[in-house]
Amino acid sequence: MTEATGGRRELRKAQTRAEVRQTAQRLFAERGFGAVTIADVAAAAEVAVQTVFNHFETKEALFFDGRTPWVEGAAAAVSRRTAGSDPVAALRGYMESALTSVLLREHEPENRSYVEDLARSTSLQSRERMLVEQAGERVAVELGAAIAAGDWPAARAADHATARVLSRMVADLFLVAGRVLVLENRRVVLSPEPDDARRTSVQETTAATLAELERGVRGLAARLVDPAP
């Protein structure tokens, strides 16, 4: 197989994946996640059922595909930050921007079916929790490397074990806080009575929450690195 042939094959695969995803997510929006089967998706996309499974291991993976850039983005914010800059500050900045985008997007009328599906489906909720955990694991790896390299001023004297604990603690605190804020925002979105004040409050709470988390983990790092009273 030539390089050109291989390139065309990969392009066709990417196009098929995108078409299957677009078809599936359109059907989910029209009928609801629970009412759509993989066979429905395959028929609408004019591909075989096995083709769908070749690209997406589950219907839940298909639902979320392309909708969770933060799974990779949070870790990338740490790994691709400006040389010498604070890795936790980079994480906080990314999380604030990403969360603000999510909170606003989920209030848009065209995305209501997405929020409703998440509220109804325990399998989607489980998948989303798994994605949050995956994001935390990836962030912890990057933070661990940054802390071990002495890049976080709050923990420059941390030993290997302390750096490992801090990296996972910081990653999970930020990711779980983000999930709490998103879930509260969805409650507001699905409330039978419009609550613009509560909507604004959730959005305003995001920046304050993340800033306090950053301040808190700096204090925690100081105590763990130097536990003397």
Image: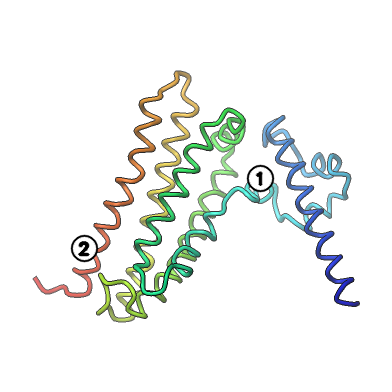
Residue 168, image x, y percentages: 38, 66
Residue at mark 2 = 219
> What residue lies at 40% left-to-right and 24% top-to-bottom?
196
Identify residue type, mark 2: Gly
* Position of residue 100 in the picture relative to residue 50 (left or right): left
Closer to the camera: disc 1 or disc 2? 2
Label 1, label 2: how far apart the Cα atoms are: 39 Å
Q: Which residue is mark 1?
A: 63
> Which quadrant would the N terminus be assigned to in this image?
bottom right
- Of 217 and 120, the residue lying toward us: 217
Q: Residues within 10 Å of mark 1 (few under 14, many from 20)?
A: many
Amino acid tagged 1 = Phe
Q: Residue 170: x and y, percent?
A: 35, 62
Q: Quadrant of the C terminus?
A: bottom left
- Secondary structure of the residue carrying tag 2 is helix
Most extreme residue toward the front is: 82
User: Does residue 183 appear left or right of residue 220 in this picture?
Assistant: right
